[in-house]
Amino acid sequence: MSQLTPRSSAGSESRKRKITEYMSDHRSPKKERLEEDDENDDDVESESESLAATDGTILAPKYVLKFKEAFELHLKMGKQQASSLKQLKKVATEFANNSDFEDKERLVTSLMHYIRYSLRQGVLSIGLGLQALEEALNKGTSVHVFPDFPKRPPVAAVFYAKKRNITYTITAVKALNERMNGDTFGKEQAEKDTLEAEWKYLRELEAFLSSHKEADDLTQGQIEYVKTMIANKKKKLDPQPKRIAAGGKNGKSATRKDQPKPKTPLDIYMAGNPTLFAEYSPEKRLRKFEKRFNKLDDGEQAVYVNIAKSSGYA
């Protein structure tokens, strides 16, 4: 009679692995949902634990909700405006200070604390998330999410620092501006570079609007936002004198003298150096600018000629 041969431990381990893999691949949908719910509960519990981890300055939700209702009614009545969370704290503080609520500072601190909590992924509902998405993307400012949206050019101080090999830092802006104001030639060059960059920025905005309108991938709010940026930039770079209303002064019709004259490269050069020769009379200042402009090399003069041409002035 033959004896039974015991099964090898290796074969037993192999079968166990196969059974485990089969069970994991054939879990019931109900069990998966339960596990997913457990994970979501863990997320919310974790969020709540971090919410409770305060130093005691945060008021209970019940009191904050009462303050929120009064504040919301105040906003709906149009007494104050807050278009974004960035402005919310300031507006809420003003409302609290003029209200009958006690512990005003803690109320505002608690309001902002709970708002941050309510916007976390584990707490925010899908409906509110989609509503926030729609509101944000319908704003004209959302055009900044486009990778090819033009970047605003730096200020004159940045160009000056680069020319003079100075390390530019936000904390040293005041000192840098004072140094630049005492350096007439350096300031003139920095203002020239700034003017060129501003005109380039304007052309980039116009090109962006044109190409994306053609591609039909901008919302109406974004289109109007970029148009406003372009109009404001043109107004800043080329301020036009106010036109006299029909009839002119004393009922006289407006003459050709009232119409703005086309700008020349010299005019643009002067506009880019508003403080230069400011101590002289207009006539003497113009003569000094003409003399300085004529001393520029051909390459530098060509810059102002090209700016005038691209703007339709020359």
Image (spheres, helix red, strand yellow):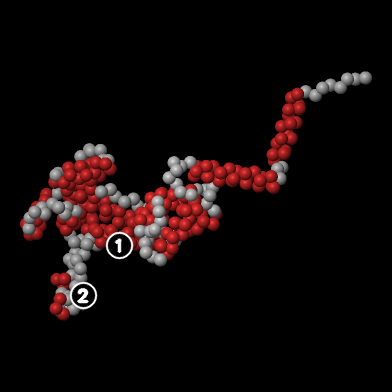
Q: Is residue 104 left or right of 255 when viewed as pictured? A: right
Q: Identify the residue under disc 2.
A: 245
Q: Is residue 278 visible?
A: yes
Q: Amino acid at mark 1?
A: Ala
Mark drawn on residue 231: 1
Question: How far across and down, in percent of the image, does residue 161 sit?
Answer: 23, 41
Q: Is residue 141 visible?
A: no
Q: Quadrant of residue 12?
A: top right
| Helix, strand or loop under label 2 | loop
Nearer the observer, 92 or 200: 92
Toward the bottom, the furthest residue is: 251
Nearer the observer, 225 or 33: 33
Quadrant (top left/top right/bottom left/bottom right) for the N terminus: top right
Q: Is residue 263 left or right of 64 when viewed as pictured? A: left
Real-space Cα separation, disc 2 to disc 1, in angstroms: 22 Å
Quick one: label 2, few (<14), some, or many (20+) residues within 10 Å?
A: few
Q: Quadrant of residue 308?
A: bottom left
Question: How far across and down, in percent of the image, does residue 162 sit?
Answer: 24, 41
Q: Quadrant of residue 238?
A: bottom left
Q: Is 114 rendered above or below residue 5?
A: below
Q: Is residue 47 left or right of 17 when viewed as pictured? A: left
Question: How far across and down, in percent of the image, does residue 60 sit?
Answer: 48, 49
Quadrant (top left/top right/bottom left/bottom right) for the C terminus: bottom left
| Helix, strand or loop under label 1 | helix
Label located before the other in sequence (2 or 1): 1
Q: Amino acid at mark 2?
A: Ala
Q: Is 56 rendered above or below residue 237?
A: above
Residue lying at 15% horizontally and 76% vertically, measured from the top left: 249
